[in-house]
Structures are given as structure tokens and as C-alpha cells.
């Protein structure tokens, strides 16, 4: 059985040394959260500059100064942050995501500038409908700026990422699949387990329903998501139970 792209949204990349690895693209909810945090932070900067200006200068903070400041923040805030902080603005850092190039390498100045230059196209008239449409139909949840800059926004994998996944799966009884899985299939199941806490139960069962029926024991009373999490627990080193059966 080949890897089901509808089930697993992870992106495969290959390093120059020939090492294969997977990136998990960040979806609309977490990217919206990061964007809102960045907007709030930019307004804090503007308000802070306003009070400093009013305190130290005798002439008032004119509308033209506000427009120039807002323009500079809109156009350069994300570029400076992405280049200075490994693809992360304050919002992305707090949301646990970052910008990288499509091959997984760090974002460079040209890619960052292009993706942010086209931010105005993605947010035309501040309706965000273009960005929403582009991210919905894209396999990597990319907006137009990401396509033009050849970038993708992915979850940041810290050193404790795998450890946290194993701790999370320890609450599920390991299940041995009814047949041997390929490397890609194992990675798909484990990637599902990593994303499970972010999906919500209904969405997780919807995604798991694409692949779980091929693996699960028909007599099992577990949901599709629970069944895949049981297999992920087995793959991550849990003590297995009888093949294809669940408690």
C-alpha cells in the first residue's frame, strides 16, 4: 500500500547529502493565531512610539508619520524577523511555527522579501479571501506569497518533539497492524499522532477515516483515530498486544 497523500499532509524533502526528512505544514488556524499576535505586537510598537514621540518632541504625532510608520512595519517587520530569528516572527515563535524554503533549508532574503511583498495580494482589501482559497487548495497550505517565494510555513520541531509524542502515546494501548507497513506508511501514522492534539477529535477521526479502515479489525470498538494512535504507540516502542486487536 502506498502512502495516502489525502491522509498525510506532511511534505517530503531531501537534503543535499541525500537524507530524507518530513516537514509538517502549518494550517490556517495556527497561522491565523500567529498573524493576530503579530498584528497586536505591531500596534503595541506604534502606540509605544506615539507616546515616546509626544513626550520628547514638542510637535504632535501627525497622521503622515503614522502612515509612514505603519508602512514600514507592514513591509519590513516580517522580513526582518524571518531573517534575524530563523524564519520566525514573534507570532510564529509563540505559535510554534516558522518559514522555510520548500526544500527545508532556511529562508533567504530574496525568498522572504518576495513572500512578504505579495502579502498585499493575499490580503486584498483586508478580506483575506485570496489567502484562504490558496491555502485551502494547496497541499502545503501555501498562500500566493509562499508560492512566489518558494517557501512553506511548518511546525517547529524542537529536541523534545519526539519525546513529547512518545509521552502522549503512552496513554494508548499499542496495537500491531494486521500486515507489515512500509516506511512511508509508518511515518504517516506517526505524523498523524504528532498532529492529533492540534486537530480536535472530530477532525482527527475524519482524517483517520481515510486510512484506518484498511488496517483496523472490524470487531474493534475503537474510533478510527484511537486505532491509529494505538498503532503509533506500537511503532514508537510500546509493548504490543495481539495482532490487529484492541481492548
Image (spheres, rainbow, N blue to C red):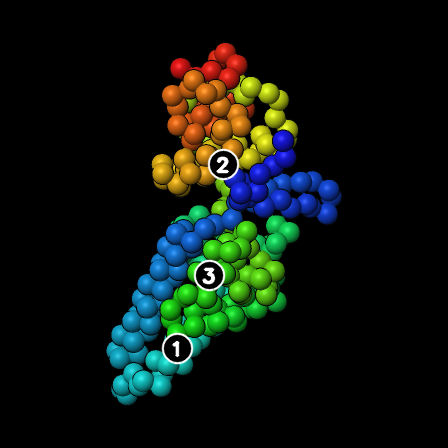
Q: Is residue 101 left or right of residue 133?
A: right
Give SS at disc 2.
Answer: helix
Q: What residue does disc 3 label? A: 133
Which of the two labelled residues, at mark 3 and mark 2, occupies the earlier sequence position? 3
Q: Is residue 98 left or right of residue 16?
A: left
Q: What residue does disc 1 label? A: 69
Looking at this view, is 168 or 203 the one in front?
203
Most extreme residue toward the bottom is 59
Q: What residue does disc 2 label? A: 210
Task: Establish if 202 lies above or below 61.
Answer: above
Which of the two labelled residues, at mark 2 and mark 1, occupies the earlier sequence position? 1
Q: Position of residue 140 (x, y in %)?
A: 54, 52
Most extreme residue toward the top is 242
Which of the two labelled residues, at mark 3 and mark 1, occupies the earlier sequence position? 1
Q: Position of residue 174 (x, y in %)?
A: 47, 19
Looking at this view, is 101 or 204 the one in front?
204
Quarter of the rendering containing residue 91: bottom left
Q: Position of residue 1 (x, y in %)?
A: 63, 31
- Marks 2 & 1, CB-CB < 8 Å contact: no
Amino acid at each position: 500500500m502506498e502512502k495516502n497523500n489525502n491522509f498525510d499532509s506532511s511534505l517530503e524533502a531531501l537534503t543535499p547529502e541525500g537524507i530524507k526528512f518530513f516537514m509538517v505544514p502549518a494550517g490556517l488556524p495556527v497561522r491565523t493565531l500567529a498573524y493576530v499576535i503579530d498584528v497586536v505586537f505591531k500596534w503595541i510598537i506604534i502606540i509605544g512610539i506615539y507616546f515616546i514621540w509626544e513626550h520628547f518632541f514638542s510637535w504632535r504625532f501627525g497622521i503622515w508619520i503614522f502612515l509612514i510608520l505603519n508602512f514600514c512595519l507592514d513591509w519590513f517587520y516580517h522580513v526582518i524577523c524571518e531573517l534575524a530569528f530563523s524564519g520566525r516572527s514573534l507570532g510564529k515563535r509563540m505559535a510554534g511555527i516558522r518559514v522555510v524554503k520548500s526544500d527545508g533549508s532556511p529562508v533567504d532574503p530574496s525568498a522572504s522579501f518576495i513572500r512578504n511583498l505579495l502579502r498585499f495580494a493575499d490580503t486584498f482589501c483586508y478580506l483575506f479571501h485570496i489567502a484562504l482559497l490558496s491555502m485551502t487548495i494547496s497541499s502545503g497550505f501555501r498562500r500566493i506569497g509562499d508560492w512566489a517565494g518558494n517557501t512553506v510555513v511548518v511546525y517547529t520541531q524542537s529536541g523534545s518533539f519526539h519525546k513529547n509524542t512518545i509521552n502522549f502515546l503512552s496513554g494508548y494501548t499499542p496495537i500491531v497492524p494486521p500486515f507489515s507497513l512500509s516506511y512511508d506508511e509508518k511515518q504517516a501514522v506517526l505524523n498523524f499522532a504528532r498532529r492529533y492534539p492540534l486537530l480536535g477529535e472530530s477532525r482527527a477521526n475524519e482524517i483517520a477515516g481515510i486510512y484506518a479502515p484498511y488496517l483496523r479489525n472490524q470487531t474493534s470498538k475503537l474510533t478510527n483515530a484511537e486505532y491509529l494512535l494505538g498503532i503509533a504507540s506500537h511503532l514508537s516502542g510500546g509493548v504490543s498486544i495481539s495482532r490487529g486487536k484492541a481492548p
